[in-house]
Amino acid sequence: MFTVAKHDGRLAFVDRGGYQSRNASTRWCIEEADRLHDFGDFDAVEVWTGDCEASASGYCYSHVQSFANTVPDFNFHRWAEAGVDDYEATCAALAAAGEKPAATDRAGWIGALSHGSRKTLHDLRDPALLDVTLMEWRPAAPGATRLPASAFVSLPDLAARYAYLVDVEGSGYSGRLKYLLHSGRPVLLADRPHLEFFYEHLRAWDHYVPVRRDLGDLHEKIRWLQAHPAEAAAIARRASSFAAQHLTRGAAARRWRDVLAPHVARRAERRRSVRCAAEEACDVVYRAPDGSGTVKLATLRAGEAVTVDALPGHALHVGERVIRT
């Protein structure tokens, strides 16, 4: 988790600990969004970077059955530990792999056993329908970021190998779904409670093939895809169009802009411009309601103005003039 604020035109982050490089990559995304959209100043907000929501109202990568307060995850920069060095390059490689016929007319998945549904998925392996590989991440070598694995298939290689790609939940939300939707392959999406920001626009049978959370209909859905190649290809094309609209770095930057806009507006509402109307210099001073103290904000030349934050209940003195805030 970390906090982010913007004061006097500069972003400020306070890191409070997180998993792998998620905090750093999410900060990179916010900085990129600010570069593109030039946020106004805003007060500190908390951003949680775990697999599950930290609170119902906090800013998190996912929320349970809600899109509110969901923010783009670290993947829009990179996932260095898993061998994804750049989001956009990986998505482009996935799309290129999906333009060619798959090596096999089956569905495929590889991943760690981080949720019971993944064990269920492994039990559903079928030589005519579904390949599943369970793997384990191992500690990185000293000074290295990327984690070695007991088995590894890159996302582009996964798309090259299989005609259909499966996505199931992990410890919380699934970070890989956004990649798979770029692949040009039909995605079999198992239901899950953890919703990311783009789920608001994601539609079953338009952009993916829905699968029950218990995976009880997975084989049936794979057989349907095998028997309906034209419909399968149409779903994959719509998924690619969806990804091009909603799952780019530019789209993530716009989401950050929209999430932070109310905070920028609240900060702006508290700010006001004051001018020295006297013929001589004016001190700009806040006085406490009980007269117990003052805070000097600036000294203005005659005719000069300054923008200050309102301090409710305090009296703002501009020279001899008193302004209630």
Image (cartoon, rainbow, N blue to C red):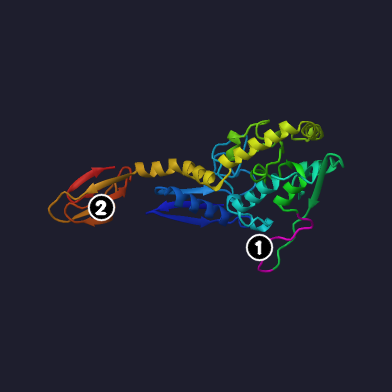
- The image shows a total of numbered marks equal to 2
Q: CA distance from mark 1 to mark 2?
A: 51 Å
Residue 27 x %, y %: 53, 54
Going 50% across and 51% down the picture, which residue do you hit? 30
**Residue 165 sits inside the magenta stretch:** no
Residue extending farthest to the left is 279
Residue extending farthest to the bottom is 142
> Where 285 falls versus 122 (above or below)?
below
Residue on which disc 2 sits: 285
Going 65% across and 34% down the picture, which residue do you hit? 207
Residue 71 x %, y %: 55, 44
Going 49% across and 42% down the picture, which residue do you hit? 259
Q: Are marks 1 and 2 in contact (CB under 8 Å)?
A: no
Q: Is residue 305 left or right of residue 94?
A: left
Label ID, residue 145:
1
Residue 276, visible in the rendered structure: yes
If you read the primary sequence from the N terminus, does the residue marked by circle 1 or circle 2 appear first?
A: 1
The boundaries of the magenta stretch are: 142-152
Q: Secondary structure under badge 1?
A: loop
Q: Is residue 245 left or right of residue 268?
A: right
Task: Give the residue type that dot 1 points to.
Answer: Thr
